[in-house]
Amino acid sequence: MLDTAIRNAEIVTAADRYRADIGIRDGRIVSIAEDVGPATEEIDAAGLLVLPGGIDAHVHLEQPQGGDVVMADGFESGTRSAAAGGNTTVLPFALQKKGQSLRDAVQAYHAAAEGKCYTDTSFHIIITDPTPQVLGQELPALVRDGYTSFKVFMTYDDMVLNDAQLIDVFDVARREKAMVMVHAEGYDAIRYMARRLEEAGKTAPYYHAESRPQSVEREATHRAISHAELTDVPICIVHVSGRDPMEQIQWARRRGMNVWAETCPQYIALTADDLKGLNMDFDGAKYVCSPPPRDLDSQAAIWEGLRDGTFDIFSSDHCPFRFEDSHGKDVEGARTSFRWVPNGIPGIEARMPILFSEGVSKGRITLERFVELTATNPAKLFGMYPRKGTIAVGADADLTVWDATREVTMSQELHHHDCDYTPYEGMAITGWPVRTILRGRTIFAEGEITGAPGQGVYLERGTSRAFG
């Protein structure tokens, strides 16, 4: 007897689309057939799509910010929101503070997540202090323990690594076969632009975008690629915002380099004009993120990359701060200059509906490509495939049931996060997740959370497919 049978499913993977029943036992898919036989629980998916559960490979939850700033979502609210958006696995970041050991950072992050997650999780590591101890002992040991990806920053005062440090980190990644995620924006150029704008009295949130033009992202992307070429290591350039950095990635691939790329919903749904607010006012702070949304040409370029394979994954970069909060966007000093507005916007719940609606429903990408971008490629890139990211016998029964014709207006009231706004308020969506199933158990159905905190498990990961 099966635990669960999903009947009349139109199954879509990154490679196929077909009709069948899905049989689930002990959290795994055990059969896919015209009739999988009797089951304790029956789910009728007639008229609906059944896709692999979403994997959001780039989210920030309960991440220390320093000063008075507090992130809006912890593990409980963040993974709850993820489940409501069709996700079954999320990958947040364990942040190393300056002077902190990597092992201590990871242990503290596990303690923060313990017993709180609705979805499965696995952690990337953010490296801010690559000491000889970290690079020679701690990082190799953690990679061997299943922490097979880490992120480095080319900007931000408290996280930026210089070129020598980047090269040293890349070298360890090559040796240990770990995937490096790179936030590519030029630190010194941004400091110059911010100072010049402030001296001219241009301090509203809108000028955050002007302080970080595409040129600083293009330059940093090329520099990261050059370091990766020198050290012969695969890298993933994250949250790519427009044509200029895309062209650097395409250039590298034409030369045979192993460079992967990610983009996010803000770069197909928002523009820099959103940062103007109603009248160059503080409402624009709701849209402050880095890199910033750009212009309509940049949106068109991102769609080209989503279609032609330039982009491998589509993540949310969920980094939520409450707007009406002195510990969030309205922290002390934020109204005096864009430089003090916390960088980041919520998006973990909106990621897949936006890409489905703007991509699949509008004919820009196929359903198979949607699955590839939101589930299969993240699983492959970060060492979870084929347990995650596909619908196949032996895989975890992580599934999302979609109503491809449902029309929804995006609103804060629909969301399950602890942020107090969504930057996508009023956006018309066609196609909506109506059920999320984690290892055979429904954790979200028809607008209601049915799972429980602690239902998600931590995933140790293998080597990225980027290494062959």
Image: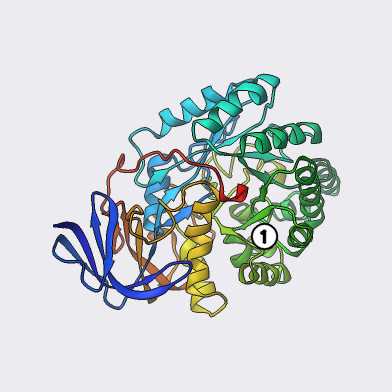
> In screen coordinates, is 392 left or right of 152?
left
Residue at 46% from the left image edge and 54% from the top image edge: 55
Q: Is residue 8 visible?
A: yes
Q: Is residue 28 above or below residue 300?
A: above
Q: Position of residue 243 (x, y in %)?
A: 75, 65
Q: Nearer the viewer, residue 98 or 254?
A: 254
The amino acid on which the numbered mark 1 sits, given as a three-letter code, is: Pro
Secondary structure type for disc 1: loop
Q: Pointer 1: what residue?
A: 293
Q: Is residue 94 above or below residue 202?
A: above
Residue at 23% from the left image edge and 49% from the top image edge: 26
Q: Position of residue 332 (x, y in %)?
A: 62, 36
> In screen coordinates, is 35 left or right of 338?
left
Color encoding of the figure: rainbow
Q: Is residue 426 visible?
A: no
> In screen coordinates, is 438 left or right of 26?
right
Q: Position of residue 348 (x, y in %)?
A: 48, 54
Residue at 68% from the left image edge and 55% from the top image edge: 292
Please rate how many residues cluster around mark 1, counting C-alpha atoms within 10 Å: few if below 14, some from 14 to 19, many from 20: many
